[in-house]
Image: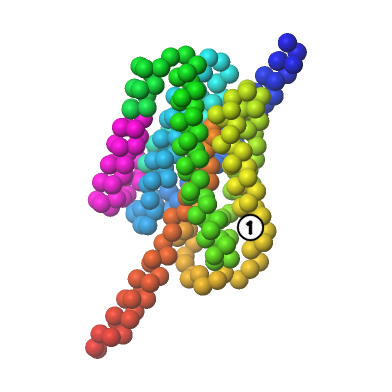
Amino acid sequence: MAILNSQNHMALAFGVLGNVISFMVYLAPLPTFYRIHKRKSTEGFQSLPYLVALFSSMLWLYYATLKPAGATLLISINSVGSVIETVYIVMFLLYATHDARKLTVKLFMVMNVGSFALIFTVTYFTMHGAHRVAVVGWVCVSIAVAVFAAPLSIVAQVIRTKNVEFMPFNLSVFLTLSAITWFSYGFFLKDICIAVPNVLGFALGLLQMLLYAIYRNSKPKNVAKEEPMKNIVVVNPLGTSEVYPVQVIDKEKEGPREDEKGVEAKERPA
């Protein structure tokens, strides 16, 4: 009994710490939306990272409500995350172009409404008890693992360009700490669905910090200079719907467009 109480206390401690860290990471896109609000335009930014983040938060929130006990901290962070991501999406819709707004609504209806409704309907009405909890938990794990494609693309970009500009060291540290705390939370709760994605998150965080140490003083390789915040790192959820890195919104295409304009201007007769 003493050991059980000790494990509960450790889970509580790591859960509270995970909530604090995850909340801070959820706020990482604020500079992006300050820029969007200031310029009254979404420019080259995309809504997909925020839609995925909301979808993941919704799934983990559903999973947490199915658990018989010990899921209060899981519910709290995913409830907050769902609200924050919804605010981001609403702001995006306010300033997006007609095409971007139309695409965002379509993705929201397919993923956040349709897919979630399908998962909820199938698991809630055809499954019961521990089986339902396990199936929803592994669906959450699958989604969390799937979004690793985003940060892996950034890792590849850093290696290719030898430029760590779009992989902030502070964010990598926070996400590594977040993975540690949520893995520990899942470990002490004996919840493999919470622990597993954060093992991958921890490994990815360490890799990002290692790359930062290797390339921080390197001269960028064939990387055009762009204005600050043109390329934005946006967080996506992992593990316990805490947000995890990282989706790059890359506007490299703008450079060639301007060059093409310059060429056209030179070719145009005076």
- Quarter of the C terminus within the rendering: bottom left
Q: Is residue 49 visible?
A: yes
Residue 15's place in the image compared with 92, above or below, is above
The question of residue 115 being in magenta is answered with yes
Residue at image point 57% right, 62% down: 159
Relative depth, front residue between 184 and 145: 145
Question: Quarter of the image holding residue 264?
Answer: bottom left
Query: Of helix, strand and loop, which mostly describes the magenta segment?
Result: helix
Q: Give amino acid for label 1.
A: Leu
Q: In this view, does 98 lie above or below 162?
A: above
Q: Which residue is drawn at 59% across and 42% down?
A: 201
- Pinpoint residue 96: horizontal percent, then vertical percent: 31, 50
Q: Is residue 259 left or right of residue 186?
A: left
Give the SS element for disc 1: helix
Residue at x 52% of width, y 52% of height: 152
Relative to 213, does residue 126 appear above or below in the rendering? above
Q: What stretch is highlighted in magenta?
A: 90-116
**Is residue 178 something that shows in the picture?**
no
Identify the residue shown where x is 75% and y is 13%.
Answer: 2
